[in-house]
Amino acid sequence: MKLQRKDGERFFRIYYSLLSWANKDLHFFPDPVVIGSRSHKIAIFKLRKAVFEAPKYINTYLEENPGNLGPKDLEMIKSWQEHRLAGTFAVMRHQTDHSILLSIDDPSHVFGVLGINDTIRRMVGPNLPQIVDALLLPYDERIIIDGVLALHPIRLEGTVKQELEEACQAAAAKAGVVTSLPAPPVTASQEEKV
């Protein structure tokens, strides 16, 4: 339920190259800084939001290639720009291959998501469902989180838990579990099946 070590190392090399470069303009962290350190999670949230909401950062990075990345790595950054999915999700369950996340913002999709260095199971704990804010990114025909989750400090029980489970089952019945981005659109004929 997480990337292999070499894939995780590749992801962080690419991702933190982009974030470190953008930070020189945005100044969320003083220089020098290890952007991946746990003590900087709030600043990382703000930095990544700024980078992905303003296309100029990724576009300029792709044009200038300040990290001297290869073509496949640059293509990956481009895929993040085009197909990322940021929002609020319910972590519904953990399976052998991935964790199941239901989009709260658009509950028509259920996603099969991998962690990078840690499993999502380890990040959110055993009490499910758990509401989180996350950034989902494509990674070689899979979906990953970017390594940072913001857990909502609420416990879901009773009716709310049941409603989330029903929404998860309905979304999975309509479109299956989405394991790569972009998510396919849910067609009218798929909506009529449930």
Image (cartoon, rainbow, N blue to C red):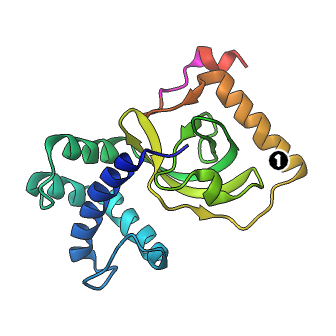
Main secondary structure along the magenta-highlighted residues: loop
Q: Residue furthest bottom?
A: 30
In the picture of the structure, the residue carrying the numbered disc 1 is 161
Q: Nearer the viewer, residue 72 or 130?
A: 72
What is the tally of numbered marks visible in this picture?
1
Q: Quadrant of the C terminus?
A: top right
User: Which residue is situated farthest in the left direction here?
Assistant: 64
Q: Residue 78 lies in what quarter of the image?
A: top left
Q: Position of residue 141 (x, y in %)?
A: 39, 32
Amino acid type of disc 1?
Lys
The boundaries of the magenta stretch are 184-188
Crowd around label 1: few <14 · some 14–19 · many ≥20 (10 Å): some
Seen from the viewer's position, the closer of residues 174 and 31 is: 31
Does residue 163 appear in the picture of this structure? yes
Compared across the picture, whether 49 is left or right of 64 comes to right
Q: Is residue 181 visible?
A: no
Q: Nearer the viewer, residue 8 or 188?
A: 8
What residue is drawn where x is 60% and y is 47%?
Answer: 105
Q: Residue at x 15, y 60 (%)?
A: 67
Q: Is residue 7 above or below residue 141?
A: below
Quarter placement of the N terminus: top right
Q: Is residue 2 left or right of residue 164?
A: left
Q: Secondary structure at mark 1?
A: helix
Residue at the image position 23 percent from the left and 61 percent from the top:
57
